[in-house]
């Protein structure tokens, strides 16, 4: 909120999935409470499925419209998702990168994490230098996301996603994770070795990352007591 108050046309990096929904709801409430106009806010989604019909309710364009643009009162034309059209897919990654750069880069990137450690749709093995490109989803990710589709077979096999290199360029990363299913991925991201086998560990290479977790998602963190101590004793000026 302070970012948007300071910069009304701030560029947000928008994650899909169930995790950020409570954050988006909180943003709506704060915006209403503070009478903040969000109509100039710009945004770039992390990723998009390939192979869905345009307008499919589970396409991330539709999800972002339904769960972010409409409730927050954003301007649809300011919010971008990677273009998954088959005709232009070979150049869609480059075009997305250029659009992010032309917007001045992402100020605040909201991230969730997959149970296999993916961020965006950067599956294990994704290069830390990778830019927006087409990826193949793991079976674990397809199974995790099957809850949104009629069957596992209906879950797309491919996607276009911002790369870990794209994500690293954002000025501030906010990684969200809730629930026990995310505990291993969070421990690997926060405390594990920096390795492409755990894409979430890219956060350790970023100068400004905030990790917000509940107790269940934090359960495997070895240094949890220190993080609580640091949070309890955070300097007055240190806010999100
Ligand atoms: C999805 C998205 C990610 C998201 C992750 C976790 O497949 N591509 O951006 O962070 O998987 O999803 P959820 O928050 O529903 O657990």
Image (cartoon, grey):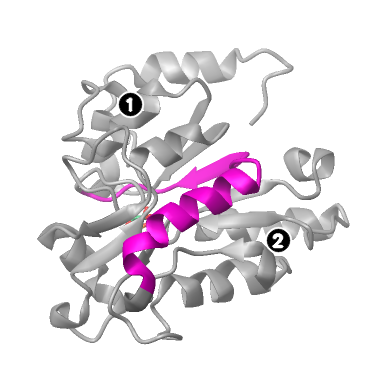
> What residue is at 70 percent from the left and 61 percent from the top?
28
> What residue is at 65 percent from the left and 41 percent from the top?
104
> What residue is at 49 percent from the left and 33 percent from the top?
169
> What residue is at 48 percent from the left and 49 percent from the top?
97
The part of the chain drawn in magenta is 88-115
Q: Which mark is residue 94?
A: none
131 vs 59, nearest the viewer? 131
Instruction: State which tag comes first along the sequence, 1 or 2.
Output: 2
Q: Which residue is mark 1?
A: 190
Q: CA distance from mark 1 to mark 2?
A: 29 Å
* Magenta span contains residue 37: no
Q: Which residue is mark 2?
A: 28
Rendered location of residue 145, percent (x, y): 26, 68
Q: Is residue 219 at all visible to an observer of this figure?
A: no
Mark 1 vs 2: CB contact within 8 A? no
Q: Is residue 45 at all visible to an observer of this figure?
A: yes
Classify the position of the N terminus by image quarter: top right
């Amino acid at each position: 909120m302070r970012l948007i108050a300071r910069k009304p046309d701030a560029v947000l990096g928008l994650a899909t999935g169930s995790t950020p929904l409570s954050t988006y709801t909180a943003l709506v409430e704060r915006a209403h409470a503070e009478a903040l106009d969000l109509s100039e806010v710009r945004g770039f989604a992390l990723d998009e499925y390939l192979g869905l019909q345009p307008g499919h309710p589970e396409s991330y364009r539709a999800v972002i419209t339904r769960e972010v643009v409409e409730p927050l009162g954003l301007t649809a034309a300011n919010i971008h998702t990677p273009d998954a059209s088959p005709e232009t897919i070979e150049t869609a990654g480059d075009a997305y990168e250029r659009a992010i750069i032309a917007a001045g880069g992402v100020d605040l990137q909201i991230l969730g994490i997959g149970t296999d450690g993916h961020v965006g749709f950067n599956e294990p093995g994704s290069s830390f230098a990778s830019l927006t490109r087409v990826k193949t989803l793991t079976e674990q990710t397809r199974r995790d996301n099957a809850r949104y589709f009629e069957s596992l077979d209906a879950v797309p096999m491919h996607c276009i996603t911002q790369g870990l290199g794209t994500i690293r360029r954002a000025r501030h990363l906010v990684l969200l994770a809730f629930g026990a299913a995310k505990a291993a991925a969070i421990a690997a991201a926060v405390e594990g070795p920096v390795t492409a086998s755990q894409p979430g560990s890219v956060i350790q290479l970023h100068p400004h990352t905030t990790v917000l977790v509940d107790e269940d998602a934090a359960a495997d963190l070895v240094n949890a007591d220190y993080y609580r101590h640091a949070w309890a004793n955070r300097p007055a000026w240190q806010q999100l």
